[in-house]
Amino acid sequence: MTSNTFGVLFRVTNWGESHGKSIGVVIDGCPPLLELSTKDIQKELDRRKPGQSKITTSRKEPDKVKILSGVYEGKTTGAPISLLIKNKDHKKQEYSKLKNVFRPSNADFTWQSKFGIRDPNGGGRASARLTAGNVAAGAIAKKLLKTKTGIEILAYVKQISNIKADIDSKKINKCDVETNIVRCPDKKASEKMQELITKTKNNKDSLGGIIECVVKNVPAGLGEPIFDKLDADLAKAIMSINATKGFEVGSGFSCAKMTGSQHNDLFEKKQGKIATKTNNSGGIQGGISNSMPIIFRVAFKPTSTIGKPQKTIDTEGNETVIVPKGRHDPCVLPRAVPIVEAMTALVLCDHMLRHKAQCGDIK
């Protein structure tokens, strides 16, 4: 199986299965002398881990990370950093009846078609459980970005179903996001979202929504045209997250209704620096960052596995009905927030190192 490694200079290799003994990640290309401890990584994993609230999956995984290599006396050495996370809450018996059945909108049929074999326990390698490794790697990328450039990445729930939050991306901070279990900084909207998620969970169904991400203090010059444009690499990284179905930067699809004179971001000088009056470009022009905040949105579909009976087909082509008993999030968005941040950090960290290799330090 290929494509388990992401990045050019800051390279991340993800490994493991949902109900295997362990999952983990290897980070190659992290510069030496970065101060790093398990605390730096654990705080991000705790935001993603299952069982953290009444509106998430009931699977209980502590997701305690172990650093196996690449760190000596609290600093990175330049060697590959290997991180291990053990799986504790195994319930493979819940998936025994699904071994020969294709769950609707899951990866069962497509993986079986491609490889001729699949691990049915929790989705195996196709499970969102594997995003824990990416979040762990993203924690390192976040710290490197913060240390070297001051870049800050902040994602939050913008919409769940038809409930939309009123959020000013210029004023938002991490404390606002972490004040509630939905991770939506709009208090009134978050309360409505929580009520809807709870109601939907009780009805054995699921919900989708939109996460918005803002990246602040981004220097101009990150991005590698023509084929590795910054927004293109962000799109690939974000769309690799389970359950994602849409991605837009800046004005996104709304630009289709605008004229050039309405959409163009006019340049001006602010405090002696070049900036733009508007940010319809979302901080990226020509595939390269322009020093304005990078802002994008990602759409997540409703969780595929629900508690309602659904018609499907088994591996022999026979029609059947399934009612999965696995433990699943009624809405993935609250736990997806740190995943979006992590994948964003991996892209920006990789491009920061690539820029330095070709052009020198970022100004």
Image (tube, rainbow, N blue to C red):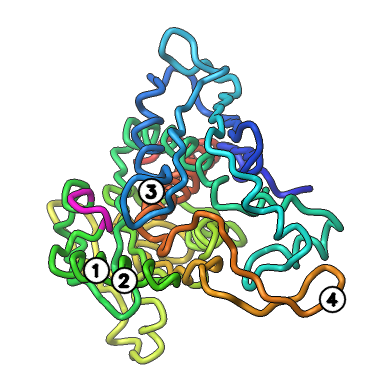
* Sequence order check, earlier mark of 3 and 2: 2
Residue type, mark 4 in image? Gly
Farthest top residue? 73
Residue type, mark 3 in image? Pro
> Looking at the picture, how far across and down is residue 12, in whole percent?
59, 38
> Looking at the picture, how far across and down is residue 251, in whole percent?
34, 76
Element assignment for label 4: loop
Majority secondary structure of magenta residues:
loop
CA distance for labels 4 and 1: 40 Å
Q: Nearer the viewer, mark 3 or mark 2?
A: 2
Q: Which residues are magenta?
A: 178-183
Q: Nearer the viewer, mark 4 or mark 3?
A: 4
Q: Which residue is mark 2?
A: 199
Q: Is residue 179 magenta?
A: yes
Where 135 sits versus 65, above or below? below
Q: Which mark is residue 278?
A: none
Q: Are marks 4 and 1 in contact (CB under 8 Å)?
A: no
Q: Which residue is mark 1?
A: 195
Q: Which residue is mark 3?
A: 338
Residue at the image point whose x is 42% and y is 42% from the top: 49
- Front-lying residue, 304 or 321: 321
